[in-house]
Image: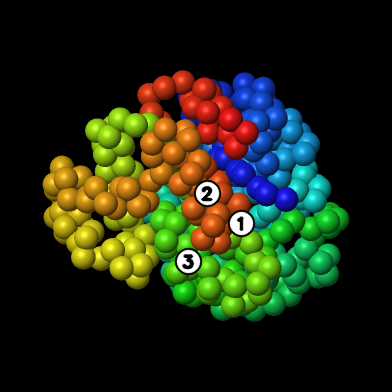
Amino acid sequence: MKRYGITIPFPGVPLHQQRDWLIELADLGFTDFWTSETHELDGLTPLVLASCWVPTARVGTAILPAYTRGPALMAMSAAALAEAAPGRAVFGIGSSSNVIVEGWNGVPFEQPYQRTRDVLRFVKAALTGEKVTDVYETLNVKGFRLGRVPDPAPKLMVAGLRKGMLGLAGRESEGAIINWLSADDVKTVTPYVHAGGPDREIIDRIMVFPSEDKDAVRYVGRMAITAYLNVPVYAAFHEWLGRGERLQGMWDAWKAGDRKRALEEVPDSVIDELIVHGSPEECREKIARFVDAGVTTPVLAVLPTGEDLREVTRRLAPSA
C-alpha cells in the first residue's frame, strides 16, 4: 500500500473543528495523520481524535521526546494509542532537542542516544505485559507491569539524524523517522536504517511551501531554517551531510546574536534542497523524488503561505 501522510493538527482552527477537514483529506488520498510535540498541542490528543473521525487512517507520533514522559507513562501512552487505533498506530520516540527538553521542560538533555535506546527497550518490554524490573543506563524501573496490553501492539519507531540513531532505529525498531533533509540526503541515511533489515520503514516529514512566489519562499525558508538548523542536533546533522561550509555563515551570525545577518546568510540553494516549493503539481513531483530515494511514507508538513490552508491541502492531495 502506498502511503501519503500529513502533519496535524492544522493551525488557526480549533482542534474540535477539524473533523470534516481530516475526513475530506482521507477521501482525497491521505492515508496517514502524524503529530509532533513541541510548543503547541501534545502529540497524542489530535491522533486519538483522528483515529475516531477517520477509522481507516494510520496515526503516528513524530515524535514524542524520550525525556518528557516517565518510562511507565510512555508505555501507557503507547498502549492507549494502540487501543484507539488498533492495527493503525505508530509510536515514534526520539531524543528531541536541548531546546525542547531542557529549555522548555526543565529536564537535563544528557546522553540522548542512550536515553532514546533505553526508553525504546523499556516500552518494548512493557508492551509484552510482563513485569519489568531492570536497570538501564539512563533509567531504572522496578516492578512495572502494563495493566492493559494492546493487541495488536503499536509499531515502534525511532527518530534518527546521524549514524547512531539511524542504526538504532534499524536494529531495534520497525524503522526510522527522519526530517529536514533533501531527497538526495535520503540516499545517505537509509543504508544505516536498512542495515537492521531491508523491510524497515522510512517516515519522512517533508517541509512543503506550495507557492511559486520566490520572495515568499525565500522569506519563509530562511525563517524556518534558522529556527531549526541552529539547534545543535540539527547543526551537527547538516555538518555531517556536508552542508557545513554553506551554513557556517549562518551559524556564526546566530552565535554572535545577529539574527538579521543569520537570515541573510542562508543560501538559496539550501532552501531549495530542504523545502519543497512551487505549484502543487511541482510539489507532488518533488515529493515523489523522496519516495524514489527510499522514503516509505512521505509526511507533508505544510508551511503557511497566507492562503486558505484547507484549500492548499486539497491541492496537495495525491488524488488532486
Task: Give the quadrant of residue 123.
Answer: bottom right
Query: Which mark is nearer the camera, 1 or 2?
Result: 2
Few, some or many residues within 10 Å of mark 1 (<14, 14–19, 20+): some
Q: Is mark 1 on a helix, strand or loop?
A: loop
Closer to us: 186 or 220: 186
Separation (CA) of disc 1 from disc 3? 13 Å
Disc 1 or 2, which lies upstream in sequence? Answer: 2
The numbered dot on residue 187 is: 3
Separation (CA) of disc 1 from disc 2? 11 Å
Q: Which residue is drawn at 39% across and 39% down?
A: 277
Few, some or many residues within 10 Å of mark 2 (<14, 14–19, 20+): some
Q: What element carries label 2?
A: helix
Q: Residue at x 49, y 75 (%)?
A: 164
Look at label 3 and name its amino acid.
Lys
The numbered dot on residue 288 is: 2
Res 214 seen here = yes
Q: Height in image: 70 above or below 61?
A: below
Disc 2 or 3, which lies upstream in sequence? Answer: 3
Closer to us: 48 or 275: 275
The residue to which callout 1 is attached is 296
Q: In this view, does 121 lie to the left or right of 162?
A: right
Q: What element carries label 3?
A: helix
